[in-house]
Image (spheres, rainbow, N blue to C red):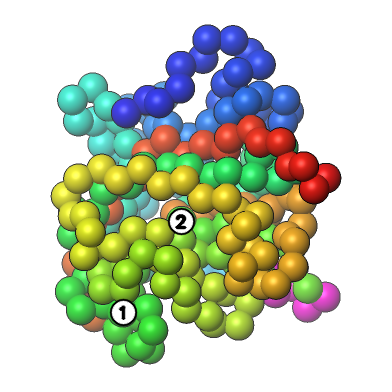
């Protein structure tokens, strides 16, 4: 499912530190081996970011590289747990919304927590989510957009948790078991939910899965996480 081939250096870049490329590939997971942990991502452990290592792949929660029909991707699995991996800015890539405001990726929901609903605290699980973290306030609280693959809510639903806002990007009511392509204008989404223009440089991208409130199982695959070049006429 590789959507862009590296035909020229000014067209596609694999996580380069320059923002000159038309497409910046955050990760397409083709450079890993099947069964690997995603070593280009940091695993969240409590309040710390630690290296993703194969030894951290445990039975009830993990991110692992898969290979299917000669396409590699990352799978998130949780059984009554939560798990998250993060790719901080400047850790192999730069992202400036003035040049790359479009975020796109592919994902596939193999299993989502039954009855999960982001609006209800008792069932607030998201089988698959992609987070974009923006600048922090004076006490260190970031603004976050969480793009979710919801078990129950329709696409474009918005759920607010203070400085974290959930936008449903895909829903089980529309697609399960098949790859879904998502393309989001991050600037437009930020203005929509926070009422102002975002900082030019997001801090991080994260992948997430949880099923601990519903005490169920989730399995979601992610692939082709990319930033697309755009011309913002308002700049």
Residue 40 left/right relative to 82: right
Which span of residues is magenta-colored? 138-142
Residue 58 left/right relative to 190: left
User: Which disc, if any, is residue 75?
Assistant: none
Q: Nearer the viewer, residue 91 or 151?
A: 151
Would you name the residue on which mark 2 appears?
Answer: 130
Q: Secondary structure at mark 2?
A: strand
Residue 201 left/right relative to 150: right
Residue 179 in the image: x percent, y percent? 25, 43
Q: Nearer the viewer, residue 220 or 58?
A: 220
- The alpha-carbon separation of the residues under discs 2 and 1 comes to 17 Å
Whether 13 is drawn above or below 201: the answer is above
Q: Secondary structure at mark 1?
A: loop
Specify the principal SS of the magenta part: loop
Instruction: Report crowding for label 2: few under 14, some 14 to 19, many 20 or more residues within 10 A (C-alpha).
Output: many
Q: Nearer the viewer, residue 224 or 78?
A: 224
2 or 1: tag closer to the N-terminus: 1
Q: Nearer the viewer, residue 192 or 161?
A: 192
Would you name the residue on which mark 1 appears?
Answer: 117
Most distant residue in the front direction:
233
Residue 208 visible, this orientation:
no
Residue 110 in the image: x percent, y percent? 18, 53
Specify whether residue 141 is painted magenta. yes
Residue 28 in the image: x percent, y percent? 42, 32
Q: The C terminus lies in which quarter of the figure?
A: top right
Residue 81 in the image: x percent, y percent? 30, 70
Q: The N terminus lies in which quarter of the figure?
A: top left
Q: Residue at x 71, y 46 (%)?
A: 97
Residue 89 visible, this orientation:
yes
Most distant residue in the top direction:
7
Residue 89 left/right relative to 161: right
Whether 122 is drawn above or below 158: the answer is below
């Amino acid at each position: 499912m590789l959507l862009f081939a590296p035909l020229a250096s000014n067209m596609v870049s694999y996580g380069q530190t320059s923002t000159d490329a038309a497409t910046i590939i955050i990760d397409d997971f083709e450079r890993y081996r099947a069964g690997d942990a995603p070593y280009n991502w940091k695993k969240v452990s409590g309040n710390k970011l630690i290296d993703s290592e194969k030894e951290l792949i445990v039975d009830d929660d993990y991110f692992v590289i898969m290979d299917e029909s000669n396409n590699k991707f990352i799978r998130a699995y949780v059984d009554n747990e939560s798990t998250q991996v993060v790719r901080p800015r400047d850790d192999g890539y730069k992202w400036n919304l003035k040049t790359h405001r479009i975020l796109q990726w592919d994902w596939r929901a193999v299993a989502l927590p039954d009855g999960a609903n982001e609006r209800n605290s008792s069932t607030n699980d998201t089988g698959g989510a992609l987070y974009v973290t923006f600048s922090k306030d004076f006490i260190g609280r970031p603004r976050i957009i969480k793009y979710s693959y919801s078990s129950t809510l329709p696409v474009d639903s918005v759920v607010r948790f203070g400085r974290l806002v959930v936008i449903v990007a895909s829903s089980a009511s529309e697609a399960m078991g098949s790859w879904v392509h998502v393309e989001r204008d991050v600037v437009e989404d930020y203005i929509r939910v926070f009422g102002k223009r975002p900082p030019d440089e997001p801090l991080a991208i994260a992948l997430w899965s949880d099923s601990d409130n519903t005490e169920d199982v989730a399995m979601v695959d992610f692939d082709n996480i990319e930033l697309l070049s755009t011309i913002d006429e308002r700049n």
